[in-house]
Amino acid sequence: MEAILPQVSDLFSRDGRFTRWLQVEAALANAQGALGIIPAQAARDISEAAHVEKLALDRYDEFYAKTGHPMVSMLRLLEAAAGPESGQYIHLGATTQDIMDSAMTLALRSMFTLTRAKLVSIQSSVLDLCQRHADTPMMGRTHNIQALPITFGYKAAIWADELERCIDRLDQSAQRILALQLSGAVGSMVSFGEDGDAIQEKMAEQLGLSVPAVSWHASRDRLAEFTGELALIGGCLGRIAQEVYLLMGSETAELSEPWAAGKVGSSTMPHKVNPTSTQHMMSLARDIRYHHAAVLEMMWVDHERNIMHFVGERQHIEACCVAAGELLDRADALMAGLQVNEANMRANLNRLGGLTQSEHVMLELGKRIGKQHAHELINQIAVDAFQNGKNFEEELKKNDTVVQALGAEQIHALLDPMQYLGKCPELARRAVQTLRK
C-alpha cells in the first residue's frame, strides 16, 4: 500500500493549513450568500479567491510581523484577492478560533481516512500470517521466560484482534469528533443574529462536518479524544514492533524485519542485520503518547476561551499526526514483509529440555494424587533440573510417585510440546474467518 506520510506532511504544511482556513472562509461566505446575509456576488468572489495559489502569500510574513495575528494576516491577503468591494464581507461574524478549529477538524477527517485505510492494510497482512502459520508451533513466553507452546498464527491473531478494536474505535469516535465550529467570540452566536443556526447548517453541509449542539471553544475533549485514538494505535503497533524486535534477537531468531539488498545494519560490523524499523516504531509510539499527554493538559481552558491552550495545541496535534503517519507506514511494511523462521521456532521449543511441559505433567499427575500435591512435587523436580542442568525427563522417571502414577511412556508423551498447543490453531483460523468479514 502507498505510504501515507507524504500526504500527512502535506496536510500539515503551511500551504495545507492555509488551504483549510480558506476552505472554511469560503464555506462561511457561501452560506451567508445563500441566505442573503451578504451579496451573492461577494460570496462568489470570496469563494473563487479562497485558494492559496490566488493569494500573495509572499506577503504573509510581512503582514504577520505587523499584526502578530495569524488569521488577520491571511484575511488581508484574501481581502485583496477577493476585490475591494467583496473583500469587505470576509469573515463576517466569525472569530479566529471558529475558522481554525473547523480547519483542524477538516485535517482530522483526512487523518481518519488515511489512518483507517492503513490499519485495514496492516490487519490484512497480519491475517495472512494467521492463516499461513495457524499450525506453526513456537514457544509462548510470559515474563520474558519460556512458558507453554503456542502457534505463531495464534500470536498474530491477538495482534489482528487488537487492530480490529483500533479500527472500531476510529469509526465510533469520528461521529463525535468531526464537528463544525462556528459560534462567534464567546460562543453565543450573537454576531450572526437570528441566522446562526442556518449558517451552521449550510457550512456543515458544504464542509462535510456535523453541527455541534453548542460551541466547543473551551471544550477540547474532541481533539484530546483524537490524539488518544492515535496513542492507542501507537500502543498497539509499538507492542507488535517490540515483539518482532525481541524475537529477532540472535539467540532467538524466530522473526525478522524485511531486509532489502544493499541495506546496512552497522557502519563497522558487516554482519549486522539490525531491527532498525521496529526501533523507530517503538520510538514513534512513545512520541505519540507524549503529544497526546500535552493535548490532555490543554483541556483546562478557563471561561469561554483563551489563547494559552491554543498556542501549543495545534503543534502537538500536528506532530502527533506526522508521527502516526510514519508509524503506520512502517507497520504496514513490517507486516507485509515479516520473515518467519519456522525452523528456529521449532528448535526453541526444546531449548529447556521439556521443562516447559511441566504444567502438562503436573495436571495429569494431579488427576491421580491431587493438584496441590502434584504441583509441589513437579515444582521441586523442575526447579532442580533447571538450576542444575539436569534432564527433566530423566529426573521425572527417577521419582517413584511420578512413575507409579503415570508410567514411563506417558511421561515421555506428556513432554511433547506438539501435544499441548490447546486451541491455538483453531483460534488463529477463527480470527481469520471472523475478521475477514
Image: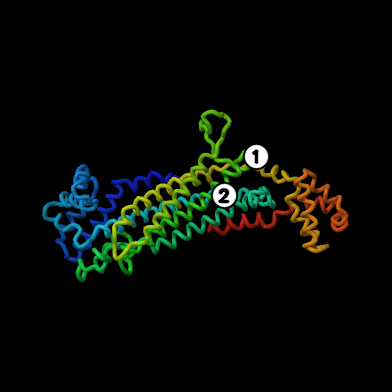
The quarter of the displayed image where residue 402 is located: bottom right
Check disc 2 and give the amino acid type.
Answer: Asp
Camera-side mark, 1 or 2: 1
The residue under label 1 is which amino acid type?
Glu
Residue labelled with disc 1: 251
Q: Is residue 21 visible?
A: yes
Q: Is residue 314 left or right of residue 332?
A: left
Give the camera-side residue of 296 and 425.
Answer: 296
Q: Residue furthest left?
A: 85
Mark 1 lies on a secondary structure that is loop
Please name the residue shown 42% across and 55% down the image.
293
In percent of width and height, residue 171 lies at 44, 60
Q: Alpha carbon of mark 1 to alpha carbon of mark 2: how far? A: 26 Å
Give how far across and how far down residue 74 sits, in percent: 22, 50
Q: Which residue is mark 2?
A: 128
Q: Earlier in the sequence, mark 1 or mark 2?
A: 2
- Taking depth in this image into account, of 293 and 242 the one nearest to the observer is 293
Q: Viewed as shown, does residue 125 lie left or right of 317?
A: right
Please tell me the numbered disc located at residue 2: none
| Of the pair 296 and 98, the residue shown nearer to us | 296
Residue in the image at 37% along x and 51% along y: 316
Instruction: Name the residue: 64% across, 52% down.
Output: 142
Q: Residues within 10 Å of mark 2 (few under 14, many from 20)?
A: some
Tell me which colouring the rendered structure shows.
rainbow
Q: Residue furthest bottom?
A: 194
* In this rendering, position of residue 43 left or right of residue 325: left
Q: Residue 356, percent across and down?
A: 73, 50
Quarter of the image where one finds residue 347: top right
Estimate the x, y position of residue 30 in percent, counting from the top left: 22, 60
